[in-house]
Amino acid sequence: MSGLSIVIPIFNEKKNLVKLSDLIYKFVKNKNFELIYVDDNSADGTLYVLRKLKKKYKTLKFYIRKKKPRDLSKSCIMGFEKAQYSNILVMDGDLQHRPSEINKLYYKLVYHNYDIVVGSRELAHKKNEGLKIHRLISSIILIFIVNLLLGFKTNDPMSGFFIFKKKIFLKAKKNMSKKGYKILLDLIYAQNKPIKIKDVFINFKSREEGLSKMNFKIIYLLLRDIFKKFLKF
């Protein structure tokens, strides 16, 4: 059906969920939309908060992914498969992505007929003060490697804030690795046919509560996945 499914993979984001949900329901203008949280079996009381939110918002859904190991992409895939609408938006659960920018991405996708619209971080711009220096440097290096090895598709293939047509996921699903920490990268480079991608610059905020998941292990896994994709080309 035509509309918007917002998929948010989460892990130990209890402190951010109420504020995030309230902001999404405040700003999203589309009457046909649903909010889907996919929790990677958090241990911080997230389930209790999700149950309370479900009572408050009738179009809010949540799923608990109990299979190990924990994996952001697998959580996203679960959300994509549960989504009932033809357009799917992905964002983080830590309030670094502004709900006020959801409508901008949605209208760009629908009314300009793109396949994917990326909430692209201006990594060299001062507005991205919310991005810690080690994440800024690692993101710039990873994007350079992606563009060098896999070819330029977007300014920010590492973004976690993007919207796409569900049909391109269904067509590319069998070619996706469906694991790791950058689902956008997987989705873009699994396509068999050219697709229309548009970058929309966003202002990246600082994490408000909880701990960042980015560490050297995740960076290593990202590099490994990038080189695996390159070797298949």
Image (tube, helix red, strand yellow):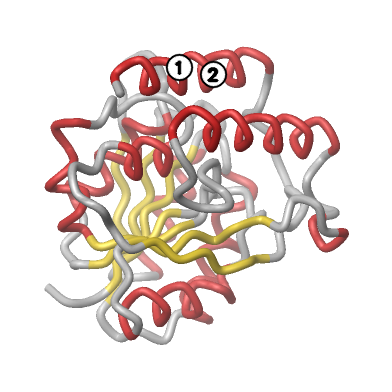
Which residue is found at the position 41% from the left and 44% from the top? 184
Residue 205 is situated, as x and y percent measured from the top left of the image, at 74, 57
Residue 72 is situated, as x and y percent measured from the top left of the image, at 43, 32
- For residue 37, side relative to residue 3 (left or right): right
Q: Which residue is mark 1?
A: 227
Residue 168 is situated, as x and y percent measured from the top left of the image, at 20, 54
Q: Amino acid at mark 1?
A: Phe
Q: Residue 223's mark? A: 2
Q: Residues within 10 Å of mark 2 (few under 14, many from 20)?
A: some
Q: Closer to the camera, 228 or 174?
A: 228
Quadrant of the image occupied by residue 179: top left
- For residue 185, side relative to residue 94 (left or right): left
Which residue is found at the position 77% from the left and 39% from the top? 136
Q: Vertically, is 34 above or below 82?
A: below
Q: Secondary structure at mark 2?
A: helix
Q: Closer to the camera, 51 or 67?
A: 67
